[in-house]
Each structure stands twice: as C-alpha cells, then as structure tokens.
Image (spheres, helix red, strand yellow):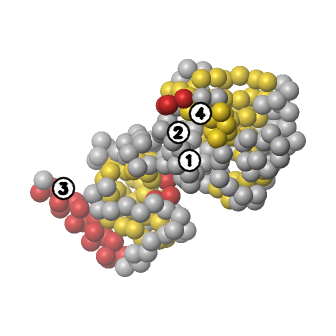
Amino acid sequence: MTDRLSRRNVLKATASTLALPIVMSGSASAFSDGDRVEPTTGLNTRHRPGTESEVVGTMYPGDVGEIMNGPTDEDGYTWWGVHWLDDDIWGWSAGQYLTPAGGGGGGADFTWPISGYITSPYGARPGHYAVDFGNNGQIGTPIYAARDGVVDIRSYESGGCGNYLKLGHENGYQTLYCHLNSFDVSQGESVSRGQQIGGMGDTGNSTGPHLHFTIEQNQTHLSIPGSDGQNVTAGNEIPKDYSGI
C-alpha cells in the first residue's frame, strides 16, 4: 500500500512540475480519481501528456486501469493519468479512447467503427437503414468492432454488401459492416470493442470506397444518429441509448 501511494504522489508531482492546464474537453468522457477504465482500441500510454512523449506501453480493450490524475489537454487530446493494473504500468492516455471498465457498466452502447465522416445518414433516402462513412477514398481505412461480440457472418455478396461482416452482440443485437476491402477476423471469432476487424473498401454494389454500417435488434434496423458530413472518430461513443443493452 505504501508503494502504491508513493507512485501516485510521484505521478501527481510530475503533472504539477509540468504546470499543464487542468481543462475539461467536451469530446472526452469525464472521469474521477479512482475510476476503473479500459481502452476502446489499441491505445498507447505515454510517460507524460502529449503525442511526442515516450510510449511506455500499449493497452487493448479488456485491459483495466485506474484513473490517478487528470484531465489535462495537450496536442489536441485530453489526457488522463492511469495505472494499468495487470501490467503495473503508469502513464498518460488519451481520454477520447477510454471508457468505463466492465462492458455495459456505464460505457457506450456502441462506438463509431471508423474514423472519417458521414456520407449518407440513416434514413437519408428510402430504404437506407444504415449510416455510410467515407475517408477521402482511402481503401483500407481501419474498421473496428462497435461493441464486444462474435463474428456471426463473414461472407461476400456480389449484388449488395460485397465483402461483409456481421457481429452478434447480446439481447439480439447485431452490427453489419459492408463493402470491406479486407478481413482481419474469422467467422465464429470473439472480438472486443475497438478491435480492428477489416479495412474499408469498394466491393459489391458500391459507388466508391465507403463503409455501410447498421445496428439491428432481432433483425429490425435501429436508427443511428448523425448528420451529413459529420466527422466521427473510431472508438468514440455513438450518442444514443439502445434498449436492453
């Protein structure tokens, strides 16, 4: 216990020495000292706040840490001091890619599966029960699981989705990812929220490189918030509460 407290004091003293501003960011979750968190994707932990600081470890969904300091803004990110418990690593991580630990325990129901922008919102045209995303035509842009689950389907559909994945989640929920250029997972594989599952492509019935993404429950499409041209970041919360999840 004495060792842990001394480490914590060192971490706080480091932030004080740096004299970095303690500023809340509207784009990051608000945490409190002692909260348990986990990454939404592969996440570098750094010696000090900032993208130029030394990486002391890379954490992945399922790794649990404890908030020990922060927040502080640097290089466009809001940083939190975290003690990653299993690996006993102490450092600073970007809050945009942290979520409360424990799956449904207060975390996002679903997170954005890609970094880019919305090219066609849900319901933008008749029968479009999905959100389309683009990223300046970049084939291979990483696509990530929007929630923990299992790969129910990995297949190809020439007249529609092209290469596609369908992930199964609890309570009858599924997410669909269409027009992929590549797969990073196999059918039947368990995946974690934020795990890379494929790359964006232009396969099947597609007008250009994009991701077609749906959220369904018991084979019924559910609406996804978002507006035309809206920028999204993989791992950030989709701002909607979905029933029973």
CB-based contact (under 8 Å), mark 4 and mark 2: no
The numbered mark, 1 or 3, whose residue comes first in the sequence reads 3
Q: CA distance from mark 2 to mark 1?
A: 7 Å
- Eye-nearest disc, 4 or 2: 4
Q: Are marks 1 and 4 in contact (CB under 8 Å)?
A: no
Circle 2 is placed at which residue position? 147
Where does residue 41 sit, x and y in percent of width and height? 51, 45
Q: Could one spot residue 5 in this view of the protein?
A: yes
Residue 19 place in picture, x, y as percent = 37, 79
Q: Amino acid at mark 4?
A: Gln
- N-terminal-most mark, 4 or 2: 2
The numbered mark, 4 or 3, whose residue comes first in the sequence reads: 3
Density class for disc 2 (Cα within 10 Å; few <14, some 14-19, many ≥20) is: many
Q: Is residue 198 visible?
A: no
Separation of marks 4 and 3 at Cα, in angstroms: 45 Å
**Residue that badge 3 annotates:** 4
- Residue type of the residue flagged with mark 2: Arg
Answer with mark 1 or mark 4, whichever residue precedes in sequence: 1
* Residue at 68% across, 55% down: 226
Identified by mark 3, the residue type is Arg
| Tag 2 near tag 1, CB within 8 Å | yes
Q: Secondary structure at mark 1?
A: loop
Label 4 neighbourhood size at 10 Å, few (<14), some (14-19), many (20+)?
Answer: some
**Considering only vertical position in the picture, is 167 above or below 34?**
above
> For the point 64% across and 41% down, which residue is it?
222
Q: Which labelled disc corresponds to residue 243?
A: none
Alpha-carbon distance for marks 3 and 2?
33 Å
Mark 1–mark 4 Cα distance, whole angstroms, equals: 16 Å
Quarter holding residue 30: bottom left
Q: Quadrant of residue 81?
A: bottom left
196 in relation to 25, above or below: above
| Viewer-nearest of discs 1 and 3 | 1
